Amino acid sequence: MAFITGQGTQHGPLLNFGVATKKGTQSFGATSSLTAISGLSVTMTPQHANNYLLILAQLTIGGTSGTSMIATLMLNGGEITDFRGNADGSRIRCTSRTSQDNQYEAHTVPLIGMWSPGSTSAQTISVSGSSNNGTFYVNRSGTSNNDTSRDSSRPFSCIQVFEFHS
């Protein structure tokens, strides 16, 4: 299998992989800083410093009406610069974002990237999020009745990390 990166085509076998799945819910209030999504992290020690990590994650987010939410891929507790939008004035940089029109919605956002850590030290890749107001919900909408409506459904979120030889 070949991948095309900024450094050109990379060939090589899959060497390692890790996965974490979050089936439960989590919630936290609005904050200007990022909050870790519990259970959505994978620790991997690359076999070679030049290898690439393919990161595939999905996060289902719900909130209250008129709430904007962001999700960001993290490395060892800090943001991965390569997986955020460009700096532009005082705008917030993130991996993915979504907005809620009402409390009945939940959106599944992708968080995807390929990156070379340049190290053989253990790397912990995780997902964090933040909202501008109200409550940030993981794996549920802002409304959560114990009924059979789709508004109260319980999706899951996950992160998968694959190490490929460069």
Image: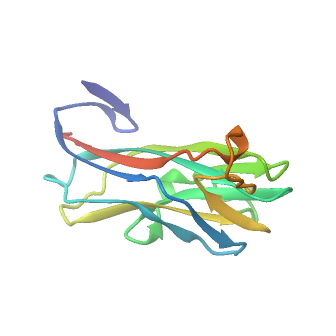
Note whether 137 is above or below 83 in the view shown. below
Count the marks: how many?
Answer: 0
Q: Is residue 16 visible?
A: yes
Q: Position of residue 33 (x, y in %)?
A: 63, 75
Taking the spot 85% from the left edge, 48% from the top edge, the residue there is 101
Q: From the viewer's perspective, tell me whether residue 31 is left or right of residue 125.
A: right
Which of the 4 image quarters holds residue 123? bottom left
Note whether 4 is above or below 165 in the view shown. above
Q: Name the colour scheme.
A: rainbow
Q: From the viewer's perspective, tell me whether residue 32 is left or right of residue 158.
A: right
Quadrant holding the C terminus: top left
Q: List the single residue furthest toward the top.
A: 1
Q: Position of residue 32 (x, y in %)?
A: 70, 75
Q: From the viewer's perspective, tell me whether residue 79 is left or right of residue 125.
A: right
The front one of 84 and 21 is: 21
Quadrant holding the N terminus: top left
The front one of 2 and 99 is: 99
Q: Is residue 93 visible?
A: no
Q: Position of residue 116 (x, y in %)?
A: 31, 50
Q: From the viewer's perspective, tell me whether residue 127 is left or right of residue 29.
A: left
Taking the spot 13% from the left edge, 53% from the top edge, the residue there is 47
The front one of 145 and 40 is: 145
Q: Position of residue 14 (x, y in %)?
A: 19, 36
Taking the spot 51% from the left edge, 52% from the top edge, the residue there is 83
Q: List the single residue furthest toward the front.
A: 147
Note whether 13 is above or below 105 in the view shown. above
Taking the spot 48% from the left edge, 53% from the top edge, the residue there is 82
The front one of 35 and 75 is: 35
Which of the 4 image quarters holds residue 35? bottom right
